[in-house]
Amino acid sequence: MTDDPPNPALLPAGLSDVLPPEAEREAMLVEVLAEVFARHGYERVKPPLLEFEDSLLAGSGAAVADQTFRLMDPVSHRMMGLRADTTPQVARIAATRLARVPRPLRLSYAGQVLRVHGTQLAPARQLPQAGIELIGADSAEADAEVAAVAAEALAAVGITGASLDITLPRLAPALLDAAGVEGEDRRRLGRALDRKDMAAVTARAEAGGGAALLLPALLASAGPVDGALAALAAADLPPAARAIADNAAAIVVALRARAPGLRITLDPVEFRGFRYHTGVAFTIFGEGLTGELARGGRYLSGEEPATGMTLYPDAMLRAVAAAPPRRRVFIPAGADGALAAALRAQGFATVAQLSAGDTPDSLRCTHHMDGAGDAVPV
């Protein structure tokens, strides 16, 4: 114990101040993403940070219940939640405030989320998000659209060579259902699939028999999309699983029509971490980068079919080179305001002298304005 006062700069674990110039970089990046979304017809919504717990955690929100901070509203005396993900809020807006707007709805958003726990690779608990949701369309073309728009947005901020990983979180459960694998056997086989343990998957699939016998070959097919689709086409899948595989193939066809240069991989039996997805799931990675740049897929927005993609600006900032800092021009006291405005129109930041002690160095200026109104390097 100590009697020393707390350090005012000390913040809770996983939370941090974002300082210049990073805060400006993040804001500019988010606006680039939002502009790409808008050009594809996605209209921006802005849900609140807090909502009543019962609505925030309904539907797809239940998947992030264990990551949601809760507090009591002193006005209504009802429990509230601080959003850990924005997608459930957009689903609520679509089902209530925009219920009478013709479908499909194209909505976009950008804002901060707060989570109870970070991860080992990403310990931050407050994260920026930007994303799109396409609500009321149940087609391969809709799934392809959100993936292609997300890839285009990444390219707009300077991330090239992105790779889209498609997973089919409902395929493995469909095969296990058809094979009648239940209880502890199902749990252990699911764990072996999660761990990509080929030996364990093979042994447990042989014990399960039936459609479960297809799992080792499908696990081995994960990789470039054409090979994985060929393995799915060759497999003797039961009807429910065949519908999932055919839908994946249709999405790939639609994606190649919209984004012919996009690299695509497919893992047919991956299902970890996608508890609320009802169809395909997407993850976008950057070439040579660690961690995800975006994640999304098909889900239910209330009772409506929906698909969407969430992009992570903090990961993007680590992936793109920092732009040169904005040039700052020292404006002496009494200078002509019109000349300073002309410099701002050229992209300079003008920093006015407010006292005799203000100098170009003290105000971190790279230039000063001369008598003719020109910016001269310091």
Image (cartoon, rainbow, N blue to C red):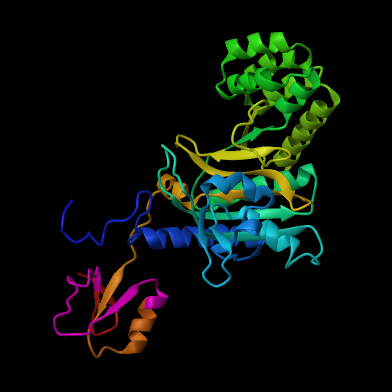
Q: Nearer the viewer, residue 270 or 5?
A: 5
Q: Residue at x 51, y 49 (%)?
A: 312
Residue 286 pos. (x, y %): 50, 39
Is residue 142 a member of the stretch shown in magenta? no
- Side of 166 where 374 appears, left or right: left
Which of 54 and 164 lies nearest the eye of the viewer?
54
Q: Say which residue appears at 22% left-offset and 72% top-offset.
A: 363
- Pick out the residue farthest to the left: 357
Residue appearing at x 63%, y 65% in the figure: 45
Q: Where 73 falls versus 29 (above or below)?
A: below
- Residue 345, horizontal then vertical, whole percent: 42, 77
The quadrant in which residue 194 appears is: top right
Does any portion of residue 261 appear in the rendered image? no
Vertical arrangement, residue 276 with respect to residue 224, above or below: below
In the image, farthest residue toward the right: 239
Q: Which residues are magenta?
A: 344-367
**x and y percent of residue 219 in the render?**
64, 19
Give above or below for 88 relative to 99: above
Q: Quadrant of residue 376?
A: bottom left
Left or right: 82 in relation to 106:
left
Q: Is residue 357 magenta?
A: yes
Q: Position of residue 210 (x, y in %)?
A: 79, 13
* Along the viewing direction, whichever of 113 and 4 lies nearer the viewer: 4
Count of numbered labels shown in the rendering: 0
Residue at image position (58%, 70%) is 76
Relative horizontal placement of residue 11, taking residue 202 as reference (left or right): left
On the image, which quarter does residue 21 sit in? bottom left
293 or 57, which lies in front?
57
Instruction: Quarter of the image for the C terminus: give it.
Output: bottom left
Q: How would you classify the magenta stretch by its main secondary structure?
A: loop
Q: Is residue 10 visible?
A: yes
